[in-house]
Image (cartoon, rainbow, N blue to C red):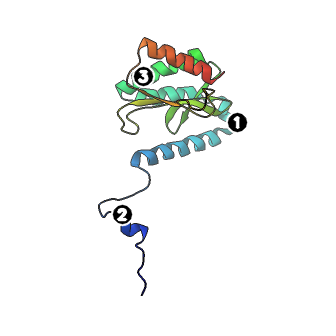
Amino acid sequence: MKGTQPSAKDTVAADEKFDGFTDEERSAMKERARELKASARRGSRAAKADPEVEVLAKIAEMEEADRVIAERLHDIVKASAPVLSAKLWYGMPAYARNGKIVCFFQSAQKFKTRYATLGFSDQANLDEGTMWPSAFALTELTAADEARIGELIKKAVS
């Protein structure tokens, strides 16, 4: 009998276990599914529904450190790019143009990370040469940070 190669399962250490998505990731996907179902149910009532109210309610649910940053970011986005509309995206505050997400806020609490994140999608016009950042870690917002974020938001929608 020829020697057989061990299967991929056999090569994984006994104490290593891969369950796929984390609980936080599964929760975010479930939130996204609820958002899509709610949007589909609204149908013609969509004009009556105000996604910004949902975003502000989600921000209000956050722990204080994340809430302070998210509230400030919301104000900066609204002032810097009034063309963007607030909406929930995977249970996170996000800002879209023509229905496509341009930027979003991810609280540290959501995925149990040490910092919150301001992220930009490929819809954001932040291109700078052959490489540029598309997400920023946030632990607090200084006046200089707020000014930089305002400029990034303006550039993203330019």
Q: Which of 35 and 81 is in front in this view?
A: 81
Residue linked to disc 3: 69
Q: Which residue is depicted at the point 40% across and 67% down?
A: 9
Which mark is in front, 3 or 2?
2
Along the horizontal axis of the image, is 4 left or right of 79?
Answer: left
Q: In this view, does 137 lie above or below 145?
A: below
Residue linked to disc 2: 12
Label 1 SS: helix
| Quadrant of the drawing holding the C terminus | top right
Where residue 11 sits: x, y (%)? 37, 66
Residue linked to disc 1: 44
| Quadrant of the drawing holding the N terminus | bottom left
Q: Which residue is depicted at the point 61% across and 20% down?
A: 155
C-alpha span from label 3 to label 2:
41 Å
Q: In this view, does 118 lie above or below 79?
A: below
| Identity, as a three-letter code, of the amino acid under mark 1 | Ser
- Contact between marks 3 and 2 (CB within 8 A): the answer is no
| Identity, as a three-letter code, of the amino acid under mark 2 | Val
Which mark is in front, 2 or 1?
2
- Counting residues from the start of the chain, the first of labels 3 and 1 encountered is 1
In the displayed image of the protein, which residue is found farthest to the top? Answer: 143
Label 2 SS: loop
Label 3 SS: helix
Quadrant of the image occupied by residue 51? top right
Where residue 64 sits: x, y (%)? 35, 25
